[in-house]
Amino acid sequence: MHLANTAAIKQYEGLKYAGDERDAVFLAHIFRLGLLPEGYIYPPAELALRDLARKRLQLVQQRTLHILSIESLLARQINLRMNREHVQRLDDGAIRAFGLPPHVERALMANMVVLRTLRSEIVALETILLHEARLRPEFLMLKTAPGIGNVLAATIMLETRTIARFASVDQFSSYCRCVDSKRISNGKKKGEGNAKNGNKYLAWAFIEAAAGALCYCPQARSFYERKKARRLPVVAMKALAHKLARASYYMMRDSKPFEVKRCFS
């Protein structure tokens, strides 16, 4: 079976007649010529594990939403500023000690119940992911990079599936949304393409990895500061994510650990 990439297949817009039969003939023609753009068919046996990692990310986003809701409620009602660690440690006694109006207190209690449930489910999903991924060589190699821990290593490994599907490091970086989308003619920018073409989960993972690398890797911090001095901070962060994406490609392809001198030479 061949999965056609419909976004990359575009017939002549001036056709006088088009239909299912004509489209089938066109697909057969470009397939016979070896020009059919194809998508990747993820193996069904591992699809559920990848979707489990995506479900964990969804629950984390919902947990953040409830934490922000609690922080906003306390700031409005009693002008109390709390960070996320303090919010997650709140219990029923601490909430009653705030002396909030009954209905406001009940709303806060509802947020906390959902927050505790999400926290326990996230831990359960992370346990399953770590158990399934910890013996794979790609997982062990990715964890040697700064800023990439258990969750990010599992996410990158599962979303990539096999690095052999990418012919070059440039294709992998583009798939991770780490490459600019622009159209150039005669050395000048004439427009932009589809900037969201790629895997949004890998894009998120490498941005998170870049944020972690800033804290634990002096060379990554130096690279970020050099980029930041010439461009906006968000562009510098994206450039650091691009560096880590390229390094991850070679780590998974060659089964070699991260080398900071080769990445930030």
Image: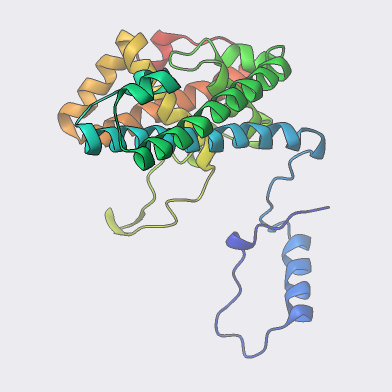
Q: Which quadrant of the figure has residue 57?
A: top right
Would you say residue 255 is visible in this rendering?
no
In the figure, is residue 93 to the left or right of 229? right
Q: Which quadrant of the figure has residue 158?
A: top right
Q: Nearer the viewer, residue 200 or 98?
A: 98
Q: Nearer the viewer, residue 109 or 187?
A: 109
Above/below status of 120 relative to 72:
above
In the figure, is residue 247 to the left or right of 224? right
Q: Position of residue 177 (x, y in %)?
A: 46, 41
Please tell me which residue is depicted at 37% across the width and 25% down the height of the picture: 95
The quadrant the C terminus occupies is top left
Q: Position of residue 63 (x, y in %)?
A: 47, 33
In the figure, is residue 214 to the left or right of 114? left
Please tell me which residue is depicted at 37% across the width and 35% down the height of the picture: 105
Q: Which quadrant of the figure has residue 139?
A: top right
Coloured how? rainbow
Please tell me which residue is depicted at 82% across the width and 34% down the height of the picture: 45
